[in-house]
Image (cartoon, rainbow, N blue to C red):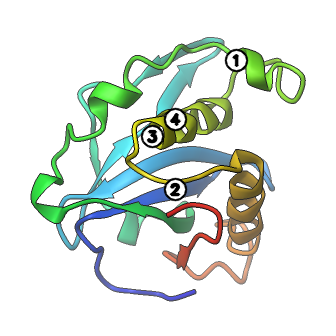
Amino acid sequence: MSHPNSLDVGDILAVLFSRSELDTFHWTICVPMSSKVAAKYHAKNSGDFWWFEDPVPLHSILTSSTVAAAIKIGTMDPTYASKDVLRQYLSPISMSTPAVDQEKEPRFTCRVWFREAIRILHQAGILTCTDVDALEEECVEHAKANQAALPTWGGYMHFVSQYSV
């Protein structure tokens, strides 16, 4: 764990943001574009309607007041890091629970989208993660320890995954 004051261009990060309800998080994949901002890939919702946010927004995760954990899950050549570098893989993800997750999570959420995004990036050879369940558990463990509503919240914290490279 570290509290860096800059992002590393070329990293691929799982970033979990605290929500108003304790122990729940907004799940995203972020790719730093500079030392201060990252492209934020995620599923958004309004009520029961879900969509992939496009155009892909830039986010200042280092100074976010709700960031719980940023876990490095992969690396890419920094010269290819752009706001749209993963868009072709992540924007087509269906906003419904894939068959592989139906038993675990019948209702679609941003976490379900994240799990499918990891599988797609693994299949495309962009990162290596053979155990999405273990990665999810690891991310939750880091995020629960640093929720924005807790008095111990430490702001941006960076970890390196044991389950994805």
Distance of label 3 from label 1 (alpha carbons): 17 Å
Q: Secondary structure at mark 1?
A: loop
Disc sitting over residue 59 in the figure: none
Q: Nearer the viewer, residue 162 or 92?
A: 162
Disc sitting over residue 121 in the figure: 3
Q: Are marks 4 and 1 in contact (CB under 8 Å)?
A: no
**Residue at horizontal 18%, vertical 54%?**
81
Q: Are marks 4 and 3 in contact (CB under 8 Å)?
A: yes
Of the image marks 3 and 1, the number of the one nearer the N terminus: 1
Distance of label 4 from label 1 (alpha carbons): 12 Å
Q: Which residue is mark 4?
A: 117
Distance of label 2 from label 1 (alpha carbons): 19 Å
Q: Secondary structure at mark 3?
A: helix
- Residue 150 against residue 42 in the figure, above or below: below
Q: Secondary structure at mark 2?
A: strand
Distance of label 4 from label 2 (alpha carbons): 11 Å
Residue 53 showing in the rendered view: no
Q: Which residue is mark 2?
A: 14
Q: Quadrant of residue 147?
A: bottom right
Residue 61 point in image, percent of width and height: 38, 63
For residue 25, side relative to residue 64 (left or right): right
Of the image marks 4 and 2, the number of the one nearer the N terminus: 2
Q: Are marks 4 and 2 in contact (CB under 8 Å)?
A: no
Of the image marks 2 and 1, the number of the one nearer the N terminus: 2
The three-letter code of the residue at mark 4 reads Ala
Disc sitting over residue 97 in the figure: 1
The three-letter code of the residue at mark 2 reads Ala
**Residue at horizontal 44%, vertical 52%?**
127
Distance of label 4 from label 3 (alpha carbons): 6 Å
